[in-house]
Image (cartoon, helix red, strand yellow):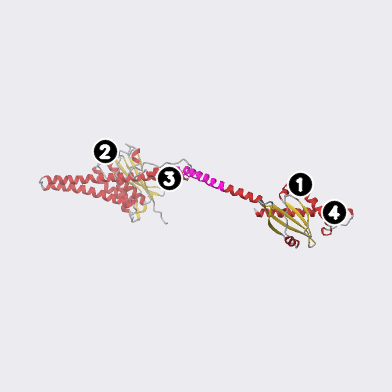
Amino acid sequence: MYANMDEMLVSRAEGIKGSIDAYRKAEELASERDDRPFLSISELEPSEFVSIAEKLLEEDEKYDPRFLKFDIELFDRDGISIAHSNALPYHINIPAEEKTEAMLGNIFFHNYIIEINDKKKNDMRVFLRPVTEAGHVVYLVQVSTSLNNLYTSLNRLRIGLFVLLPLSLLVAGLAGVFLTRFVLNPVDRMIKSARGMTGLDLKQRIHVPKTNDELQHLAEVFNELLGRLDETVGMQKRFIQDITHELKTPITAIRGQIDVAFRRKRSDSEYRKILESTSDEMDRLGKIVENLLMLARFESMEIKLTKEDVDLYFTAAKAVKNLRLLAKKRGIKLSMSGESLLVFGDEMYLESLAVNLIENALKYTKPGGAVEVRTHKRGVLAAISVKDSGIGIGKSDKLHIFDRFYRADKSRSAEGYGLGLSIVRSVAEAHGGAVSVKSKAGQGSEFTFTMPLKISKN
C-alpha cells in the first residue's frame, strides 16, 4: 500500500510538471504566432510564474476531484512557495536543508508529523520533485498526502481479518465436517457391511452406493470378489462332503467284512471270499485316492507332461481295445473309426483321457446300446469324439458334469467315483485343449476332446 501511495504521489507530481510544460508550449506557439519573444521559465519574472502556477492549480482542482486528496505546493528556484492548492487545512513546512538538497536535483520522499492540536497529530507523506531547464532547477513540485487514511484503512482491514478469519475458519470447518460425513457416509456403510461378514456366510454383500464414481465401482468389484470366494468355498465344502462320502463307502464295506469274519470261525473258502471282497474295496479306495492326487497335481501345476509325437488315433484305439471286454460284458457295441492324427503330448495321459471318456459312455448306456469312438480333424485341431446311445444329460446337469464327484444319474451313484470327467478336463487343459458335450436327456451324449494338431515343418 505504501508503494501504491508513492506511485500516486509521483504520478501527481509528474502530472503537474506535464501540465506546466503543456501550458508553456502553448505560450511558445502563441509568441511565434504573434511574433513576440518567448521567455523560458528561468527568464520569467517571479510574478509571471506565480500567476501561471496558480492558474494551473485552480484548473486541476476544478476538473479533478481526486486532487482534493493531495496537497500540491510549488516552489521557485529560491525555495519560496509560489502556489499552494490548500487541499488540507494545515500547511507543511519542509526544512530548508531538504529544499536545498532538492534544488541540487535530488528526488526524495519523506514522512512528517504535523501537530494539529495538543491531542491530534497527522502523519504526512511528502514527495519533492525538482524540475530542471538547461541543467538548472527552475522550480520544485511538492505533493503530499495524509497517512492517517492509510492507517485507518489498515486498522479496518486488521479488525476485519480478526473478525472474519475466525468466522471463515469456523464456517469452513463446519462445511468440511458436513462434506466429510456426506462423502464418507457410503464408505462407512461399506465398512459396516464388511465387518458383519464372516467366513461362515459369504452370501452377504457390501452396500453399493449409487454415486457413479470409483467408489461405486470399487464396491461392485468387491462384491464380485465375494461372489467368487463364495463359489470357491462352496466347491471346497462340497468336495469335502463328497470325498468323505466316497471314502466312507469302501471303508465301511471293509470294516463290515472284517466284522463278519470275526463273528465266528469260517472255512478257508469263506475267508478267501471275504479277503477278495476286501481287496476289491481296497482297490476302489486306492483308485479314488490316486485320481484325487492326479487332479490335485493338475490344479497345482505339479504334473510334468512327457510330451512327444503321438498318433491320437492309435492312442484312442488302445483305449477301445482295453475296454472292449467290459463293453461285451454289458452287452454294448463298442466301435472305433477315424483317421491318423499327429499331436504333441503325453501319450499316457492322453490314453487316460480316452479311457475315462469311453468308461463314462459305457456307464450310462443300457445293454443293447452302442458307443462309437471317432478321431477326426476340426480345422487346425485334432479331435476324439465318443458318442453313446445312453440316457443323455439334462440341461441342469451339463453345468456340473465336469465337477468332482458329480453324477448325472443319482440312481446309479454306486457305480464309478464321479472323477472321470474331472480328470478328462484337467488333461485336456494341460495339453492346451478343451472338452465339450452335446446331449439331451433320453437321446444319448457325445463328448468331444480337441487339441492342436502337430504342425509339420515341411
- Secondary structure at badge 2 equals helix
User: Which sits earlier in the primary sequence, circle 1 or circle 2?
Assistant: 1
Relative image position of residue 371 (x, y in whole percent):
30, 42
| Residue 171, magenta (yes or no) | yes
Nearer the camera: disc 4 or disc 2 = 4
| Residue 84, magenta (yes or no) | no
Q: Is residue 175 visible?
A: yes
Q: Which residue is mark 2?
A: 411
| Separation (CA) of disc 4 from disc 2 | 129 Å
Say which residue appears at 25% left-offset and 49% top-offset: 287
Q: Which residue is mark 3?
A: 221
| Separation (CA) of disc 1 from disc 2 | 115 Å
| Separation (CA) of disc 3 from disc 4 | 89 Å
Q: Name the foreground residue: 24 vs 271.
A: 24
Segment tinted magenta in the rendering: 162-185
- Secondary structure at badge 3 equals helix
Q: Main secondary structure of the magenta part?
A: helix
In this view, 209 is above or below 111: above
Residues at discs 4 and 2 in contact (Cβ within 8 Å) = no
Residue type indicated by callout 4: Leu
Residue type indicated by callout 1: Tyr
Label annotation for residue 29: 4
Residue type indicated by callout 3: Val
- Secondary structure at badge 1 equals helix
Relative image position of residue 414 (x, y in whole percent):
24, 42
Residues at discs 1 and 2 in contact (Cβ within 8 Å) = no
Residue at the far front in the pictured view: 118
Label annotation for residue 63: 1
